Amino acid sequence: MFTVTEPGSSGGARRKPVALVIGSGFGGLAAAIRLGARGYGVTVLERLDAPGGRACVHKQDGFTFDAGPTIVTAPFLFEELWTLCGRTMRDDVDLRPMDPFYKIRFPDGATFAYSADREAMRAEVERFAPGEAAHFDAFLKMSEAIYRIGFEKLGAVPFDSILDMARVAPDLVRLQGYRSVHGLVSRFFRDERLRTIFSFHPLLIGGDPFSASSIYCLIAFLEKTYGVHSPIGGVGALVRGLVKLIQGQGGSLRLNADVRRILIDNGAATGVELADGERLDADIVVSNADSAWTYRHLVPAGERRRWTDAKLDHARYSMGLFVWYFGVDRRYEEIGHHTILMGPRYRALLKDIFVRKKLAEDFSLYLHRPTATDPALAPPGCDAFYVLSPVPNLQGGQDWRVEAEPYRQRIASWLEANCLPNLSRHIVTSKVATPLDFRERLNATHGEGFGLAPLLTQSAWFRPHNRSEEVKNLFLVGAGVHPGAGLPGVLSSARVLDKVTPHARAFA
Ligand SMILES: Cc1cc2nc3c(=O)[nH]c(=O)nc-3n(C[C@H](O)[C@H](O)[C@H](O)COP(=O)(O)OP(=O)(O)OC[C@H]3O[C@@H](n4cnc5c(N)ncnc54)[C@H](O)[C@@H]3O)c2cc1C
């Protein structure tokens, strides 16, 4: 047993088994807290110079930009982590509910305000397509049925064995999990715009609404029931809060610690080796690095029977993201916190991104204006924004060193013409992230935003398991394992670890 020592109450020393967590994304931080609560001495090893992974924070010229997730739902999954440490989230994070959750704008200027309020939603649906309000009720009922099984039952348990899959197959068939999200939504709504409004959610976790399993229709009920929230200080406040919990447990976070390989002896993980050659011993290792990357680069080929390089080559990866972070020296009060700007094409654009892997002339955008909720994220009188465009991952062959600036300019001109008047005169700071950054900074195999694509054939037992099927005492957490990407997904993957990791006392 490898141990860290902590002072005992009588002045003696108590020994704790060691857990090393590779990566400080939300999944890694949540796993560290859960392992700390179960008696491990935990060290989180992060290759970057700041924690959070996709949720890291850029500070530039007085502006604070959350790099990634902005729509926070299922706050109870965060609250659980504070509870495990004997605290309440409110002590550290001021989470504000969003109302509406977001606005969805179509090219003709029509805007749909999406909220938790059932009557307001029925009225919005009816305004868009008279006669469809009853269809919304039926859709929500179906979303709840999927949530009860897909989130509460399947999302909370490991899928170690094909028998686990066989057990849930009848539920998946009954809930029509074999259909795509758009396919199922289209059975409820006749109006194309309503089909778009109720089917775009898989894009939040990197999936194509036309191929992602309809299980993801559960998001509508999840958001309606638990709301969409935004922390004061930005999503970075949640990252800082979790790091503080780890430190409060006696755990530690090491930045600039790039893990080069997982040390394996006799089929079991025994520690890690860092890029500078330093070796760290452990009783268990948890990887929050991308699952495909973990297997291909951190576990030697000779140790892998299932996740071979050939299988990883044939896997389907989620889409890429182009994100432009910019600050302006004025405020655009008419723009809410979250706006989805639909382009002229929906199905055809998604086909370009996911199937043809082609960078299209048009785009659909998500515009984030956090200063609508927390003006302190920008200097006085200014606004911080980011605009996100789903794009092909690097399998599309685009050279983002060449494409990035013209693409940014196209988006800027569109925003200026359609919703941010005189934008070009007011930009005072700017930074972009492309799929290349996702590959180079975050070790995403093809620069994808969200790990393996959320297809039925890559879900549950078919996804890399939370308990490695290749190496004993190695566990995986985060977007690339069950149940999948997005904050509720990665926090749930950490929760599943409680069921598959031994309690620290097993090493006593
Ligand atoms: C732009 C964007 C917007 C998004 N919006 C939303 C949203 O609004 N709501 C939502 O719910 N989800 C959203 N998501 C998805 C969500 O952010 C991710 O699914 C989630 O944060 C991923 O967490 P993770 O635990 O998988 O770890 P990641 O965030 O992927 O972090 C993994 C960490 O591992 C580190 N690492 C990798 N290799 C090594 C190594 N060898 N050694 C040491 N460290 C290593 C990386 O540096 C990284 O810090 C968004 C994602 C992006 C990119």
Image (cartoon, rainbow, N blue to C red):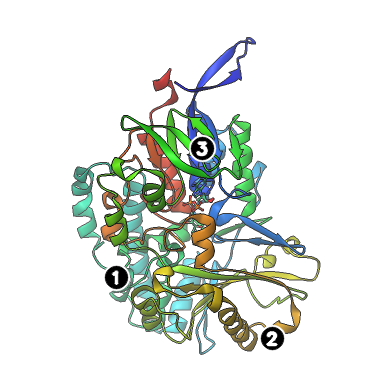
Label 1 residue SS: helix
Q: Would the CB of label 3 be found within 8 Å of ligand 1? A: no
> Where residue 244 sits in the image (x, y, percent)?
64, 39
> Where residue 37 sits in the image (x, y, percent)?
51, 30
Residue 368 visible in the shown view: no
Residue 338 visible in the shown view: yes
View extreme (front): residue: 277
Q: Relative to 439, say whether 287 is above or below.
A: above
Q: In which quarter of the image is the N terminus?
A: top left
Given the image, on which type of amino acid does mark 1 rest? Leu
Counting other residues with Cα less than 10 Å from the Cα at mark 3, is it few (<14), some (14-19), or many (20 or more)? many
Given the image, on which type of amino acid does mark 3 rest? Ala
Residue 184 badge: 1
Residue at the (22%, 49%) spot, across then down: 168
Residue at the (65%, 85%) spot, across then down: 416
- Per the image, the residue denoted by label 3 is 32
Label 3 residue SS: helix
* Nearest to N terminus: mark 1 or mark 3: 3
Task: State the residue in front, 213 or 192.
Answer: 213
Given the image, on which type of amino acid does mark 2 rest? Pro
- Per the image, the residue denoted by label 2 is 421
Counting other residues with Cα less than 10 Å from the Cα at mark 2, is it few (<14), some (14-19), or many (20 or more)? few
